[in-house]
Image (cartoon, helix red, strand yellow):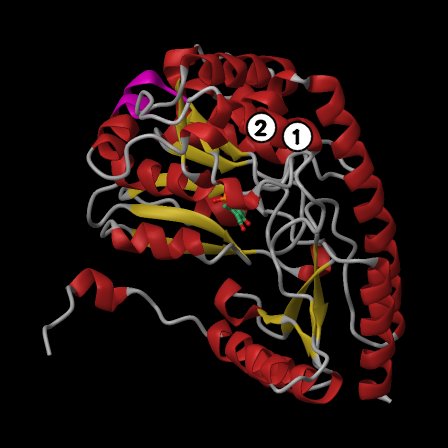
């Protein structure tokens, strides 16, 4: 057979795939498996967003657009950054991508060379180290602990900086930990970036899902050093529409556009008009976000309390829609624990292995309260 590229071969096979395919297999056998592993809102995309997409189709807005996105959308994103984040990015310092994922991918390829080091707080979203490694750069993890609610230790972060360090990746609120870094921490990270001439890539895709913490954009502290990534997926329940965006220094955005022009070109024109409606029909969108947030907050309370009561220690996350539960009580190895939870309780969870979160599994509470209660009941029987 043909040989695969070194790059393709270097992609780490996911440890979670085994659990996911086992879950699917059990479902195919007709068994009632409840999935707590999904990373998307369980709400439908709001009606005003759908209507805008239908209208775009009917009006023939179905052709190529500018690589960086339609001007109206870049204008709306620029305004959103100003209004919601206190960031000042003119429309030509904004780019629209096929999901936040592509914005991150373009950013890493625009900014990193082989051998550059990238600091990533752990537990982390798996795609960061994988994408960074694809560029030839070296992901360096900065551990955080459930004992401190996964807060970032600035001294530890600073101690990892070497002459090769180029970038710090932040994700607050975090997938998988739900941690929200406080303003003081962000200010300290911004200062480090300025002192050492580092670029901060901040993934703020969960910014609206913050429950009892203050959400601040680090770009307000170090605008020349920060690239802010965001998207429509989590805030507006639009995962399938594939709209992400970035705002930052103009030369970085230009390099990201050049990369995109030679790969995927513009994000879907129809989805861009839908995202535009989500951003400009502000009142409807805010109502939707508040509704979703209230539901997540309630579910979070039930999950955290329920899991702790079962002897599966779970810190209260302050944002996003995930909890990390310690599963030592079930098995000291989290992969094994996830397998037991699936086989015996018929609940699909994600082992922390790939997130650099040993002894823990991730459960998403972007699912109905009914499911959450049933999951707690099943886990209760399992640990008994
Ligand atoms: N960033 C984080 C932390 C995520 O959890 C996700 C999705 O799971 C994304 C980015 C990418 O989302 P999308 O590409 O749908 O915008």
Q: Nearer the viewer, residue 263 or 273?
A: 273
259, above or below 295, in the image: above
Residue 262 seen anywhere in this rendered image of the structure: yes
193, above or below 250, in the image: below
237 sits left or right of 367 in the view: left
Residue 98's spot in the image, x, y percent? 41, 38
Q: Is most of the magenta stretch helix, strand or loop?
A: helix
Specify the quadrant of the image occupied by residue 337: bottom right
381 sits left or right of 193 in the view: right
Disc 1 crowd, CA 10 A, few/some/many (<14, 14-19, 20+): some
Specify the quadrant of the image occupied by residue 106: top left
Residue 151's spot in the image, x, y percent? 65, 48
Segment tinted magenta in the rendering: 248-254
Asked if the residues shown at circle 1 and circle 2 are in contact, with their CB atoms under 8 angstroms apart, the answer is: yes
Whether the magenta-drawn stretch holds residue 251 is answered as yes
Disc 2 crowd, CA 10 A, few/some/many (<14, 14-19, 20+): some
Q: Which quarter of the image is occupied by the N terminus? A: bottom left
The residue identified by callout 2 is 187
61, above or below 303, in the image: above
Q: CA distance from mark 1 to mark 2?
A: 6 Å
The residue identified by callout 1 is 183
Q: Secondary structure at mark 2?
A: helix
Q: Secondary structure at mark 1?
A: helix
99, above or below 72, in the image: below
């Amino acid at each position: 057979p043909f040989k695969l590229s070194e790059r393709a071969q270097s992609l780490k096979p996911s440890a979670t795939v085994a659990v996911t395919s086992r879950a699917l297999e059990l479902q195919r056998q007709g068994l009632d498996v409840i999935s707590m592993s999904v990373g998307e809102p369980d709400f439908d995309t709001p009606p005003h967003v759908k209507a805008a997409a239908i209208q775009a189709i009917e009006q023939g807005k179905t052709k190529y657009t500018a690589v960086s996105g339609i001007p109206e959308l870049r204008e709306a994103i620029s305004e959103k950054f100003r209004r919601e984040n206190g960031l000042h990015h003119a429309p030509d310092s904004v780019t629209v991508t096929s999901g936040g994922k592509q914005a991150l991918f373009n950013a890493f390829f625009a900014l990193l060379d082989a051998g550059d080091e990238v600091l990533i707080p752990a537990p982390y979203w798996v795609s960061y180290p994988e994408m960074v490694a694809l560029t030839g750069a070296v992901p360096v993890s900065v551990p955080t602990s459930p004992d401190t609610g996964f807060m970032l230790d600035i001294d530890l972060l600073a101690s990892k900086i070497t002459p090769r360090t180029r970038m710090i990746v932040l994700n607050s609120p975090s997938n998988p930990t739900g941690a929200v870094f406080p303003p003081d921490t962000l200010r300290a990270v911004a200062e480090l970036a300025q002192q050492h001439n580092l670029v901060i890539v901040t993934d703020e895709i969960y910014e609206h899902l913050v429950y009892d913490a203050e959400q601040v954009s680090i770009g307000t502290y170090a605008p020349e050093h920060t690239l802010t990534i965001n998207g429509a997926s989590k805030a507006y329940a639009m995962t399938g529409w594939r709209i992400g965006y970035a705002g930052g220094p103009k030369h970085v955005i230009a390099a990201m556009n050049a990369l995109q022009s030679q790969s995927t070109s513009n994000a879907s024109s129809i989805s861009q008009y839908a995202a535009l409606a989500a951003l400009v029909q502000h009142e409807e969108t805010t109502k939707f976000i508040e509704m979703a947030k209230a539901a997540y907050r309630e579910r979070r309370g039930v999950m955290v309390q329920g899991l702790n009561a079962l002897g599966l220690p779970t810190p209260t996350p302050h944002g996003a829609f995930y909890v990390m539960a310690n599963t030592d009580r079930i098995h000291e190895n989290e992969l094994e624990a996830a397998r037991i939870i699936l086989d015996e309780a018929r609940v699909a969870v994600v082992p922390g292995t790939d997130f650099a979160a040993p002894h823990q599994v991730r459960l998403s509470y972007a699912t109905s309260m009914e499911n959450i209660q049933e999951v707690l009941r099943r886990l209760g029987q399992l640990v008994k």
